Image (cartoon, rainbow, N blue to C red):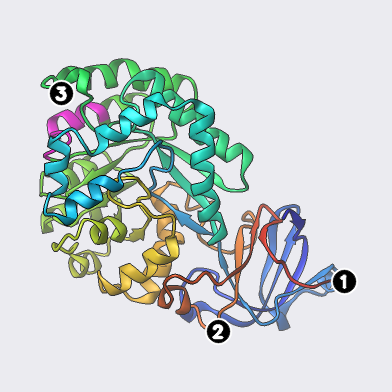
Amino acid sequence: MNADAEGLWHNARLLPTGDSERAIADGAMVVRDGRIAWIGAREALPESYAGLPRHDAGGRWITPGLVDCHTHLVFAGQRADEFALRLQGASYEDIARRGGGIVSTVRSTRLASEEQLFEASALRLEALLAEGVTAVEIKSGYGLDLATERKQLRVARRLGQHYPVSVYTTFLGAHAVPTEYAGRADDYIDYVAGTVLPALAGEGLVDAVDVFCERIGFSVAQTERILAAASKLGLPVKLHAEQLSNCGGAQLAARYKALSADHLEHVDEAGVLALREAGTVAVLLPGAFYYLRETKLPPLDLLRRAGVPIALATDANPGSSPTTSLLLMLNLACTLFRMTVAEALAGVMQHAARALGQSHRHGVLEAGRDADFVLWDIDSPAELAYWFGRNPCRCVVWGGRIVHGAGVPTDA
């Protein structure tokens, strides 16, 4: 569906920021030229907007479009057999050391054509869009050579051109050591920092740079070489940090003023305080925590006390979080991580937008911003985290157009 959403949306309950204390029980919103021209209580609607075409929300809730700020959507193949191995006791690290894990997806992704990658990834993006996601980050990292990393990022750009979703690309060439560089991780870092990243940045394919800083990934020293190269190119950075161990990744991310540090199950107080000082967002990924059957919870109370903004994302990928449901992540964040509903909603709205460096564009409904929002068939915003396996999305608006769902009655 691609219908006009211009005009006055009325008979709506509005949640402009995800904070229920700032909800508007009887609200109205004006969409003009693809942007929000006015939003507030219906009784305060300026007379000049009264004659616009009307969209009757039927008392439903309207929220900002959701933001999925950490995904690996572009890949080929699947790793269901590794899932079976884990059920028999193998760990994520065991599988990686046997030649599985990230490297197995690299083999499939290198063999896939760009068109095959696009078709497979489009299905995953469509699932996110159907749940109200209007902005998404897509990482590379399943190529580990120039040609395939380029192919992944080109597909990500194409997805943003073909679908009504804002797509932001992240170069994750330092995701794992490819087989051709086995035992030569430092040489691979030289290749990524000196050849691959500059080439792809020069082609306009990279919005940000990420590194998997971990025992089975790259050391702090190796990671810093990539972050330094990104900084020289003027690119913002983010980091996979402290997922499986405390390697000091969070403090490194903070030193480079990273947009986000992601996972963070093993982050310590020093790391949290460093994130706070740097203004770096903590991105928690409950899908990976659940799927890998981890037991070490991220230190939510410590993050709260420090005032570090907390975002949530799917981490959609074939090996540790094979999901395309951001709504499910809301439920898992509340049930597994003990987040409040308000924290979870903020985590897929304004804080997720900030984790992309796009807080000026996404995550909040206010005058002057793009008209990206979702109409939900719910009685309470808490239902977005309460249900799992149910999608209450009525329609999705992106750039002032209804791009998914049934829409609502319109009166001229």
For residue 393, above or below residue 121: below
SS of the residue under disc 1: loop
- Residue at image mark 2: 379
The numbered mark, 3 or 2, whose residue comes first in the sequence reads 3
Q: Please name the amino acid that badge 1 sits on.
A: Gly
| Residue 271, horizontal then vertical, whole percent | 15, 52
SS of the residue under disc 3: helix
For residue 160, above or below residue 398: above
- Identify the residue at image location x=55%, y=46%: 166
Query: In the drawing, does residue 106 fall left or right of residue 203?
Result: left
Q: Please name the amino acid that badge 3 sits on.
A: Ala
Is 160 included in the stretch rendered in magenta?
Answer: no
Spatial CA distance of label 3 from label 2 is 53 Å
Spatial CA distance of label 1 from label 2 is 29 Å
- Identify the residue at image location x=38%, y=30%: 109
Q: Nearer the viewer, mark 1 or mark 3?
A: 3
Residue 185: mark in rendering: 3
Query: In the drawing, does residue 242 fall left or right of residue 332?
Result: left
- Identify the residue at image location x=54%, y=29%: 115
| Residue 27, horizontal then vertical, whole percent | 66, 78
Q: Can residue 175 be seen in this view?
A: no
The numbered mark, 1 or 3, whose residue comes first in the sequence reads 1
- Residue at image mark 1: 51
Q: Can residue 178 be seen in this view?
A: yes
- Quadrant containing the N terminus in the rendered view: bottom right
Span colored in magenta: 215-226
